[in-house]
Amino acid sequence: MTKPLNPETLAVRAGSQHTPFGENSEAMFLTSSFVFENAAQAAARFGGQEPGNIYSRFTNPSVTMFEDKLAALEGAERCVATSSGMSAILACVMGLCSAGDHVVASRSIFGTTVQLFGNILKRWGLEVTFVSLTNPDEWQAAIKPNTKLFFVETPSNPLTEVCDIALLADIAHKAGVLLAVDNCFCTPALQKPLELGADIIIHSATKYIDGQGRCLGGAVLGKKDVLEPVFGFLRTAGPTMSAFNAWVFLKGLETLFVRMEAHSKNALALAEWLQQQPQIARVYYPGLKSHPQYALAKRQQKTGGGIVSFDLKGGKDAAWKLIDSTQLLSITANLGDAKSTITHPATTTHSRITAEERVAAGISDGLVRIAVGLEHVDDIKADLLRGLK
Ligand SMILES: *Cc1c(COP(=O)(O)O)cnc(C)c1O
């Protein structure tokens, strides 16, 4: 038996099977439909007796190569790509839950995910309970006979709280519930939720998978039988990934490991420096010894990742002043880009949730989030120092 390839090698090599002309760089298959040799083949493809492409809302070779590469990296049987991270979450719920089902979700999740669960899906009869990411007892207590899904993000956005995936998977499985983990912040380069017992992984490929802030995309990963209804929803409802975006993400994944290492190295150096600044009350970064789940993060993740948040003593005014005084950092809510970005969560990503929900999630008015990019860390520090002073 040959030795399995290392993850860094899989990121470069896995999934690149659709190369009809021997191309070394994977092709972008920009076609909406595929031609059959005859009527019988068309019937066999539609009937599922013969594998192969039919229409790009169902499958497309560029998208398949992206799905296979990401599946290899996450150690998943199956990956289905979506038009965005939000449509990945939507497809997961639409595929696996029905009206009357109950979902338990962490309070510390992406602001738009809170809205999707709490406002939109609620109107369609989904029951949702929000609990503390870091308190397993609350998850246990929230389980009802109709509970279908646990939904977490770890580390969370923007406070980088970390939950014990293996422990939550255990609680979920004892009750016949599936655990979905949004692995956007870590990517498979730093964390492997399926190996820890999770059933489903969600990705916003828009972030670190792209790595350069170009395209929107997402993915759902897991076992074949779990993913089948998710794929069924996607091919029918249509929020699938475009061939162009899949091609960009394929190229992005090739450099995922080196980028995540560089993002993490910069983020740790910046977090340690921020901790020493007198204007800052608290720094949130899983790679800091002062982080409440430092030991768990060290065990569960390869590094702390690229997101650092901090509370300014001066509240919202100080936060806005700091943001407005930057000259290098991009004032934008995106993350996972080579360019460092700076955000005020309370008035942007988390502005649509109520003030009470924000307080419950620990998002203060003085909170600033930095998605640390690949610039030299000294230049990032210098850009922030101006505003801190
Ligand atoms: C951005 C993000 C999403 C949503 O992804 P889109 O691609 O913007 O739709 C979901 N979860 C997390 C953690 C995110 O950061």
Image: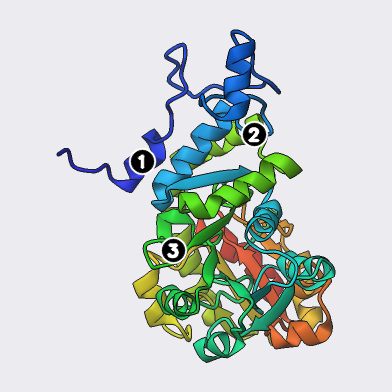
Which amino acid is tagged 1? Leu
Q: Quadrant of residue 356?
A: bottom right
Which amino acid is tagged 3? Pro
Secondary element at tag 3: loop
- Does 338 appear above or below 35? below
Which amino acid is tagged 2? Phe
Disc 2 or disc 1, which is closer to the eye? 2
- Does 102 appear above or below 245? below
How many residues crowd mark 2 within 10 Å: few (<14), some (14–19), many (20+)? some
Residue 216 location in percent, x, y?
A: 68, 45
Whichever of labels 2 and 1 marks the residue nearer the N terminus, that label is 1
How many residues crowd mark 1 within 10 Å: few (<14), some (14–19), many (20+)? some
Residue 103 visible in the snapshot: yes
Whichever of labels 2 and 3 marks the residue nearer the N terminus, that label is 2
Residue shown at 46%/66% (left/top)? 198
Which label sits on residue 58? Answer: 2
Whichever of labels 3 and 1 marks the residue nearer the N terminus, that label is 1
Residue pointed to by mark 3? 193
Residue 212 visible in the snapshot: no
Which label sits on residue 10? Answer: 1
